[in-house]
Image (cartoon, helix red, strand yellow):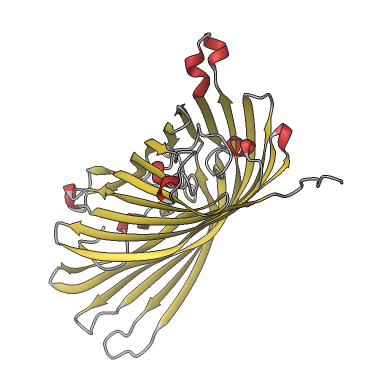
Amino acid sequence: MASSVEAGGPVYSRFGIGDLYYFAGSRLSAMGDVGAGLFGDGFINRLNPAGIAGLISTRFSGTFRYSNYNSTDPTGSAHYANGGFGGISAAIPIARDYGVVLLGELTPYSTVNYAVGRDFSQLGIESNQQFYGSGGISRFDLGSSVSITNHLHTGVKINYLAGTILQTTKLTFTDNSYSNDELTLSDHYSGALFTVGALYNGPSDFFGTSILKALNVGFVLETPTSLDLREERFVLEGVSGSTAQQYDTTSSRSGTFDIPLMLTFGASYTIADRCVLAADLAMQDWSNSKSLGVHPAQLRKSSRVAFGIEIFPGKDADTYMGHVTYRAGFYYNSSYLQIQDPADNGTYQGINGMFVTAGLGLPIAPDSQLNLGFEYGVNGTTQNNLQKDTVFRIIASVSASELWFVRSQEE
């Protein structure tokens, strides 16, 4: 870790494969990104492929995200903001009576975007160190759902991951008699994994009580995989003393990067057709993952707990605001990273985040919505000489639908 923050994004994206992107869907982002136990028409459930079995019309969704960071460490603070593509998806019902729906999605899987630096002195030699990175891994999904019974729904997706992460370390000396150096690592990732989901509506038959009729329970499994990894190194050695020469050195090596099994459990409950309560628990054990045959000490077990609520508009509303949907949520993320205290080589600090969310579903056309989501919270800590990020995020998504594959009635 560097000892001072610059304007360049969260420094924790420097480790592992960057900030992991968790996005359950345009409707669900304002509910804490819950989704494993949500089922029904009107939205694409990106988290659980079984959740799309309830769609009755073709649906499209596109998302834009804006993030604002205020980063603080023991030496100072900095501000950073960025915005960009959040994902696009389409779901097409093929056989509505059997819950067969085809799904295609393109979303980020991880992002890297940081810039930090520090002035460094050793044995009387003064230097400035800069660390900056960019890039990430994208995810392209193809999947389908099917309803086994009226209550039991399943789904599967194949997820192709690919992307490049660039990370540069630059060393500049104040004394011209020393050589300035720059090292750039270019890591190229590619591979595939599967997402399998199941969702059960109304388990009241098992327990003999009608109160559970409005309950949905869901389960999602993402299979482990080893991404192909090719690392290229580019070293630039600057001018040293009176020698006006530069030496470029390149090398490369290949191997794999392990992504572990991920399990998510979820449930939702509908109250009087006007309100939905939902909760999710996700777990992923990175403590044995290896990169190029070596386990990075920064990787650990991760978990995520989320809660969400949605209030539907009244059916007889006669004003525009009466048709607006209101959403709110909360999540606690124990990330897959633990970072070493720069001043104490034996101390590792887990990087955790806590966020509240809220949002609106604004009608813009029949069966189409502009979904606005807001997140506010903190990630990381200033303890043990680390960095705390205070984050405010806006998620804007358009969700629209059309009727496809419907046989017209003959006159």
Residue 203 location (% of width, % of height): 54, 18
Q: Is residue 51 left or right of residue 117?
A: right
Left of 293 or right of it: where is 338? left
The image position of residue 305, as x and y in percent, is 37, 35
Is there any visible trace of residue 105 in the rendered image? Answer: no
Compared to residue 313, the image places residue 176 above or below, namely below
Image quadrant in which you'd find residue 83: bottom left
Q: Is residue 168 visible?
A: yes
Residue sitting at x 81%, y 47%: 408
Horizontal arrangement in the rendering, residue 403 relative to residue 198 (left or right): right
Which residue shows up at 28% across the image and 73% down it?
171
Name the outermost residue toward the front.
Answer: 318
Label count reads: 0
Q: Residue at x 34, y 56 (%)?
A: 393
- Residue 379 is situated, as x and y percent measured from the top left of the image, at 28, 49
- Between 145 and 250, which is closer to the camera in this rendering? 145
